[in-house]
Image (spheres, helix red, strand yellow):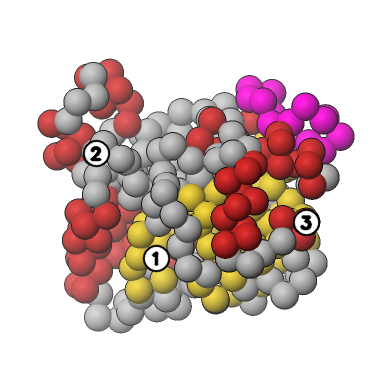
Amino acid sequence: MEICALASGSSGNCFYVANDKCSILIDAGISAKQIVERLNLIKKDPEDIEGIFITHEHSDHVKGSDVFARKFNVPIFATKGTVFNGFLCSNPELINIIRNNETLKIKGMEVTAFSKSHGAADPVSYSVVNNKKISIITDAGYGCDNIISNVSDSDFLCLESNHDRNMLDNGPYPWPLKKLVGSDRGHLSNMQAALCVLEHGSQHLKHVMLSHLSKINNTPEIALNTFKILKERKDLNCKVTVSTREMITPIFKI
């Protein structure tokens, strides 16, 4: 399989995942124009996208879903709560409702939705299996059992590392927003994410891509430095990189 973060951050999220037969998007939180441009940069044809899997209804995850889906006739998959609490597409024929823990098979890839805790109607994250397993986990308030389960058997993780707790506490956000971000329905901090991998990552885990970093309350350097605690595990030998809002990551092959 291949994976590339076309964008990831508080202002837009979109992940490209493919095997040798098809490709999908996890979220479409940048404009359709940007999605096309960034697919072109990695030499991928938007006509080949066979599904958009939406995690939840917030704009930084659905911004481009309507235009992209209609332009390229791509089906959208999302939970019932997400469909009825957000605008995903003006063509209802392209919208498909999925259930938590449901697995869809698409040309050799098994895409599974699993629930998590976040301030949205019915949020999910996704794992994609084709011999190896990729899990894409953002927008989660804490490492619930579903997240732990998927961290524990993944070969590649895109994992939220949203904020540095000191930056959040001392930053410019108003107190109610600080409280929400740091709550069990908010976002994983650098330390929460790092401890989740340290405690539950398997020897098979080869790569962790830190995702959904806050522009205000985090920096790539601070996030990467926090993940140095993984060195406490002598049996854990995984590469740690960062995805950003502004530019695509390389294509990683799993």
Crowding near the residue tagged with mark 2, few <14, some 14–19, many ≥20 C-alpha atoms within 10 Å: some
Q: Which residue is mark 2?
A: 217
Query: Residue 78's spot in the image, x, y percent?
Result: 68, 39
Q: Secondary structure at mark 3?
A: helix
Query: Residue 139's spot in the image, x, y percent?
Result: 44, 41
Q: Quadrant of residue 90?
A: top right
Q: CA distance from mark 2 to mark 1?
A: 20 Å
Part of the protein shown in magenta: 83-98
Q: Which of the two labelled residues, at mark 2 and mark 1, occupies the earlier sequence position?
A: 1
The kind of residue tagged 1 is: Val
Q: CA distance from mark 1 to mark 3?
A: 29 Å
Residue 244, can we see it?
A: yes
223 lies left or right of 131: left
Query: Residue 239's spot in the image, x, y percent?
Result: 35, 73
Q: Which residue is mark 3?
A: 47
Q: Residue at x 19, y 61 (%)?
A: 225
Viewer-side residue, 154 vs 208: 208
212 lies left or right of 230: right
Q: Point out the image quarter for the C terminus.
A: bottom right
Q: Secondary structure at mark 1?
A: strand
Query: Residue 143's spot in the image, x, y percent?
Result: 38, 48
The kind of residue tagged 3 is: Glu
Which mark is in front, 2 or 3?
A: 3
Q: Which residue is mark 1?
A: 208
